[in-house]
Every structure is written in structure tokens, then in C-alpha cells.
Amino acid sequence: MDTHGQMQRTVERLTSSGRGILAADESYPTITRRLSDHGIESTEENRRFYRALLATTPGIGEYVSGIIFFEETLGQKTDDGTLIPEACEQQDIVPGIKVDKGLVDLPGSDGEKVTQGLDNLGDRLDGYRAQGALFTKWRNVYAISEGTPGIQALEANAEVLARYAAIVQSRGMVPIVEPEVLMDGSHDMARCAEVTEAAQTTLFAALRRHNVRLEAVILKPNMVLPGKDLPRPTPEECAEETLKVLRRTVPAAVPSINFLSGGQTAEEATANLNAMNQLDGPKPWVLSFSYSRALQNPVQAAWNGNAANREAAQQAFLKRARLNSLARKGEYAA
Ligand code: 13P
């Protein structure tokens, strides 16, 4: 198969009916924070045990089409000695890999960040590919304040995200592009909509500049929501404002939009996705999930670092995944 054929096949698998993506790709500092919230130590063995638990949850392939991992996980094994990417494939789950190297300061800006990780990316991808990864993720962040994000941060971040996507596609892998407008702060929904629209518009201009094939890209955006210090909108309000922005900015050639949860509760993230799929009006893309916290919080709470809770943790994962699968079809009832 040529690179287009390979990407097409991966997109078909990732977008297959009723399924979405699990982001289990937390870097060392992030997974340490998440696990310590539940009093669990982030040792290599705990990370292996936990991510193997996720990938081997019986029946999870009905709801999860892909799992994004951190590079450590690609070489780790399940309790029965199967490599974790192989265990995913056994349930028809596509293994993916986070490839960005995190945030650094953007000099000349008002305290803004840019994502790094382009150096040697092609070589790194060849290695991940040999370990079974067929798709990738790169995350940009945009913090909202009165004067940010500025045009410099929007343009610089869009440029690296587009270069990343072009390099990934040159390897026949499918890039998830994640321009995340953060929920931190006390801005209103209209301000989040304005910034999200600017981030998406700038990103798609850059993707075009770099000849990225939109049919083989998955967009992972934030939902349009007020800052987290403010009262929460209804799912219908969130769906309406989010789809308004996406209709203005995301070409119909993009096959799938898989939202991040960004600090929403598990229930809020499910209800909001459900409302998007129920909303009338044009929706030329699959609207699904690529949640980390909204899928994993209940699982980590159930596991609690105790191997005896393995099955209870898998049941918690199965439940959240099943409810989000219903939401992806607009069939979830809170
Ligand atoms: P959340 O769903 O927790 O926002 O994480 C998504 C993600 O992968 C961020 O890069």
C-alpha cells in the first residue's frame, strides 16, 4: 500500500462507527500529577500495569478505536508478556503515539508558549512505526488573557503544527492536530469562541501552506466553554457555540473531529459531545472524543494503585467508554 492508502485505512479504522480515541499519552510529569491525585506513585511498573490494564479491558474495542500512548508504553508489555501495541491490535484498536516534546517559552511574546519537537521527528517516527504506531498526536496550547493569544503565538504554533502534520503524513501515518485553547481563567464563552476561531483559521491556513492532506488529518479541538471559574453552560449552549466555530473554520474534507476534555468532568464531557451529535444543521465530520481525563479519572479512582482493583478499574473504563460511544451517536441519556 502507498502512503495515501495506509493513511486512508488508518482513518477508516479510527473513525469506525460508535468509537472514539483514548488519550493515555501523559508525559512523565503529567502522569505523575494524575496518579498522585489518587495517592498512587508514578513508578515504571505502575505506569505499565495501568496502561496495560486500559489496553486489555475486555470488550473495550467496541467503543475505542485508537489509544494514544507516550513513548515509554510502546515498548512495555501486558501481564501475559504481549507488547501493549500488539494487545491493542488484538481488540482492533489502533496504537498511536504523542510525538511533541512539550512547551517552551515563545520569546518576544507576552508570556506565551510554543510547542517543540520537530528536530529529528522523521527518524523518531520511523522508530515508533516499527513499534506498531499508526497515528500521532501533537498538542499546541493557547492561554486566554486580555491580550493573548497574540498573532505571533497563533502563527508560530500553527506553523509548527502544520510542519509536524506534513512530516507525519510523509511516513504514511495519520496526524492528530491539537490546538487547545485552555479553559483556565474567567473569560466568557464569546471570548473562547473568538480565540478558538482564530486558532483554527490560522491552523488551516498553515496546513494548506504545507500541503497537508486534509482527508488524512484528525482535528482534536477544545469545546467552546467559559473559563473554568464561571458557571457551566448547558450542553446545548456548548454544542451550539462549538459547532458555530467549527462550521466557520474546519473544511468538510477533514474526516473526524475528536474533542479533548480539557478539565471538564467526565459527565460534562459526555453530555456536551452528545449535544453536538444531536444538534441540527450541517455536520460534515464525525464528532467523537479523544479524552484523557474524562475517560481516565474514574478508572484511576477505582484502581487506586491496588492490583486487586484491576477488574473494577476496567469496569469503570468500559462504562465511561460505552457512554461516550452513545454520545458519539447522540444516543446518551444523562
Ligand atoms: P484531556 O481530555 O484531559 O484534556 O486530555 C486530552 C489530551 O490528550 C491533551 O493533550
Image (cartoon, helix red, strand yellow):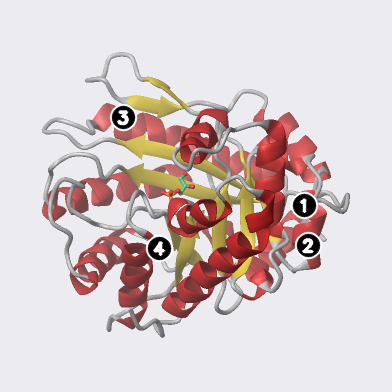
Q: Secondary structure at mark 1?
A: helix
Residue nearest the viewer, comparing 103 with 198 = 103
Q: Are marks 4 and 1 in contact (CB under 8 Å)?
A: no
The residue beneath circle 4 is 251
Label 2 – label 4 distance at C-alpha: 31 Å
Badge number at residue 85: 1
Q: Label 3 belongs to which residue?
A: 153
Q: How many marks?
A: 4
CA distance for labels 1 and 2: 6 Å
Q: Which residue is mark 2?
A: 89
| Residue at point 32%, 82% (across, down) | 278
Q: Nearer the viewer, residue 144 or 314?
A: 314
Report the Cα–Cα distance between label 3 and label 1. Answer: 35 Å
Give yes or no for contact between labels 4 and 3 (Cβ–Cβ under 8 Å). Answer: no
> Do tag 1 and tag 2 residues touch (Cβ < 8 Å)?
yes
Badge 2 marks a residue whose secondary structure is helix
Q: Quadrant of residue 1?
A: bottom right
Looking at marks 4 and 1 on the same chain, the residue that comes earlier in the sequence is marked by 1
- Judged from the image, the secondary structure of the residue bearing numbered disc 3 is helix
Amino acid, disc 2: Glu
